[in-house]
Image (tube, rainbow, N blue to C red):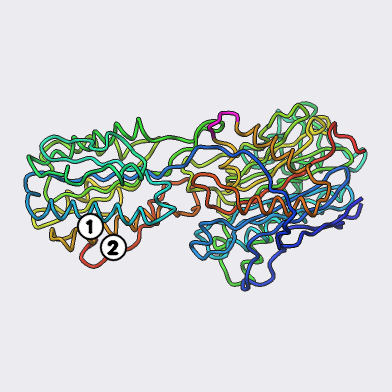
């Protein structure tokens, strides 16, 4: 494992801030035992306002680790589409870089967490559903609060570091381009998955949805970040106090084995599948999408179908950009 | 093993359309018009008000985004305050059924009563988002048009609206028309900006054009940063409608 991607799909990292952006994009790839299909479509409102697509998606793979991200640039910010493209790619790159350092056998320290000095503790994002994180020697590590064992490269910690580093990368990019960070305001949703051990972590700031469909065909929301009570407003990774609104969750291989399909989507799709009537629309949607995504053997055709679907489906009041990535495997979690 | 497959951006005829269910709920933009129909509005002002509302109806009807999401509530305050639409109604029902000749000038100016009716509607009619349940509404827009000072107690309901912690109102715009307005009073009532204008036909026309433009902009609002406590970015008012600083 050397941290190099075996493929990269989705929107490209922006080099310049000018030029036309593709209205609709659909791409796919295989990372055995998983298939990845992603698409993004410009919303009717963006056509009406003569504004480009502000959503983005990306997936990177390095023969073992799969990193996936989607983002929604704030429509009120002129450069937010570049923020979305940059952040999705950078988050994937940073996730793969971080996972290229494996756990060093025997490298454990025992810490008495009850007696942990206050100034040793780092201020955690409040929605970090993992283990206690403490700062040691300038590096973030994770402490199991029961055994007191430190594991330096825990997946939740990796996700947190990748979010932080992707944001720092964007700060530098903005500076080089003579723009402010706020010009690139964007949500960000990410997933990192070890395709051998099935360990996984998800992270989210802002609206959108990360969902799993389990082997019993039940739709389970995997991330619950804090949400604004105003549907017109969201939280962005580019805002000052962003870590207050970041959610991270880790899942063991055993937990992931219960799922056949994962979805990452921006709010343009999430708003149409989370709210009824009917009351169980989320499960109905997830099952329908799972069926449709597996209908045609050709991944290329599937990506095209998904892109067309996102560009054309009708739902009341649904005029925003729509972006959806689907990661799925054969039923039962086994490769055939 | 890895493999990258890129799709062509052109549609090929044999691609089978996906069939996926979506939720049937809608996110509504509630718009309240609180209209002064007191005795002092009799004659030309009330006629101009009726024409203005008709124009508003036509302009929203012509906007495919606005007419799909706007829900209207009209409350008059003249004599007794009345919730003419009996709650929030879909725009197409407002367009086809709201009769502007029902706007009749008579009596005093019970703005406080109309604000209490607004409070009841905010509690009863505005929907919050419930995951697995209904889509919540956008934050409501409230426009209050008056030609004078209230003749009842309005401070308490105004504070109740201002201090709401759920189903908040952050856009309650007051507009005074004619020579008898009290500018400070208008500013005290408003949550957001305050304006004034004359009470002739042209002024009412311009006012309702601006209201419809504001509603159309709000219906196309794209996501903003933050927890949603920022007032809407209204378009600048036209000449003849003057901001009161």
Please say whether residue A279 is one of the residues in the magenta stretch: yes
Relative image position of residue B111 (x, y in whole percent): 17, 40
User: Badges 1 and 2: C-beta atoms under 8 Å apart?
Assistant: yes
Chain designation of label 2: B
Q: Is residue B76 left or right of residue A42?
A: left
Relative image position of residue B92 (x, y in whole percent): 36, 45
Q: Is residue B227 left or right of residue A159?
A: left
Q: Classify mark 2: helix, strand or loop.
A: loop
Relative image position of residue A189 (x, y in whole percent): 66, 47
- The residue range painted magenta reads A276-280
Quarter of the image containing the C terminus of chain A? Answer: top right
Q: Badge 1 is on which residue?
A: B195
Q: Classify mark 1: helix, strand or loop.
A: strand
* 3D distance between C-alphas at marks 1 and 2: 9 Å
Q: Nearer the viewer, mark 1 or mark 2?
A: 2
Query: Which residue shows up at 80% across the image and 27% down it?
Result: A147
């Amino acid at each position: 494992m050397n941290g190099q991607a075996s493929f990269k799909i989705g929107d490209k990292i922006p080099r310049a801030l000018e030029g036309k952006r593709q209205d609709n994009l659909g791409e796919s790839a295989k990372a055995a035992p998983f298939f990845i299909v992603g698409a993004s479509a410009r919303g009717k409102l963006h056509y009406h306002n003569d504004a480009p697509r502000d959503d983005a998606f990306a997936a990177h793979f390095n023969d073992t680790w799969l990193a996936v991200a989607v983002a929604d640039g704030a429509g009120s910010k002129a450069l937010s589409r570049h923020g979305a493209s940059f952040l999705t790619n950078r988050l994937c790159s940073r996730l793969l870089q971080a996972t290229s350092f494996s756990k060093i056998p025997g490298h454990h320290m025992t810490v008495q967490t009850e007696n942990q000095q206050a100034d040793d503790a780092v201020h955690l994002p409040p929605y970090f559903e993992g283990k206690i994180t403490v700062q040691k020697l300038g590096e973030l590590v994770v402490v199991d609060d029961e055994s007191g064992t430190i594991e330096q490269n825990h997946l939740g910690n990796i996700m947190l570091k990748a979010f932080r580093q992707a944001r720092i990368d964007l700060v530098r990019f903005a500076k080089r381009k003579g723009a402010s960070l706020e010009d690139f305001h964007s949500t960000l949703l990410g997933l990192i998955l070890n395709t051998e051990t099935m360990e996984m972590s998800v992270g989210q700031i802002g609206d959108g949805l990360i969902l799993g469909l389990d082997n019993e065909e039940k739709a389970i929301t995997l991330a619950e970040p804090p949400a604004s009570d105003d549907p017109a407003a969201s939280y962005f990774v580019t805002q000052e106090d962003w870590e207050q609104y970041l959610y991270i969750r880790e899942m063991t291989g055993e937990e992931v084995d219960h799922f056949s399909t994962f979805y990452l989507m921006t709010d343009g799709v999430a708003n149409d599948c989370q709210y009824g009537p009917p009351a169980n629309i989320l499960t109905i949607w997830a099952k329908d999408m799972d069926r449709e995504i597996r209908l045609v053997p050709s991944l290329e055709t599937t990506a095209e179908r998904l892109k067309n679907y996102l560009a054309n489906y009708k739902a009341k009041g649904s005029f925003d950009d729509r972006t959806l990535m689907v990661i799925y495997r054969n039923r039962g979690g086994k490769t055939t | 093993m890895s493999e990258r497959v890129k799709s062509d951006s052109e549609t090929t005829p044999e691609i089978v359309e996906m069939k996926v269910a979506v939720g049937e709920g809608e996110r509504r933009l509630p718009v309240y018009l609180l209209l002064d129909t007191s005795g002092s509005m009799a004659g030309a002002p009330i006629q101009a008000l009726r024409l203005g509302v008709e124009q508003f109806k036509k302009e929203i009807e012509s906007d495919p985004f606005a007419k799909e999401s706007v829900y209207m509530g009209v409350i008059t305050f003249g004599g007794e305050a009345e919730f003419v639409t009996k709650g929030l109604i879909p725009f197409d029902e407002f367009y086809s059924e709201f009769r502007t000749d029902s706007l009749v000038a008579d009596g005093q100016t019970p703005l406080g009563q109309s604000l209490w009716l607004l409070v009841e509607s905010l509690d009863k009619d505005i929907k919050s988002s419930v995951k697995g349940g209904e889509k919540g509404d956008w934050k409501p827009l409230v426009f209050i048009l008056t030609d004078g000072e209230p003749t009842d107690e309005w401070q308490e309901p105004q504070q109740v609206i201002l201090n709401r912690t759920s189903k908040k109102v952050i856009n309650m715009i007051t507009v005074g028309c004619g020579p008898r307005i009290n500018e400070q009073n208008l500013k005290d009532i408003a949550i957001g900006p305050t304006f004034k204008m004359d009470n002739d036909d042209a002024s009412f026309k311009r006012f309702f054009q601006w209201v419809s433009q504001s509603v159309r902009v709000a219906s196309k609002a794209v996501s903003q940063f933050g927890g949603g406590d920022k007032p809407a970015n209204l378009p600048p008012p036209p000449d003849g409608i003057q901001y009161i600083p």
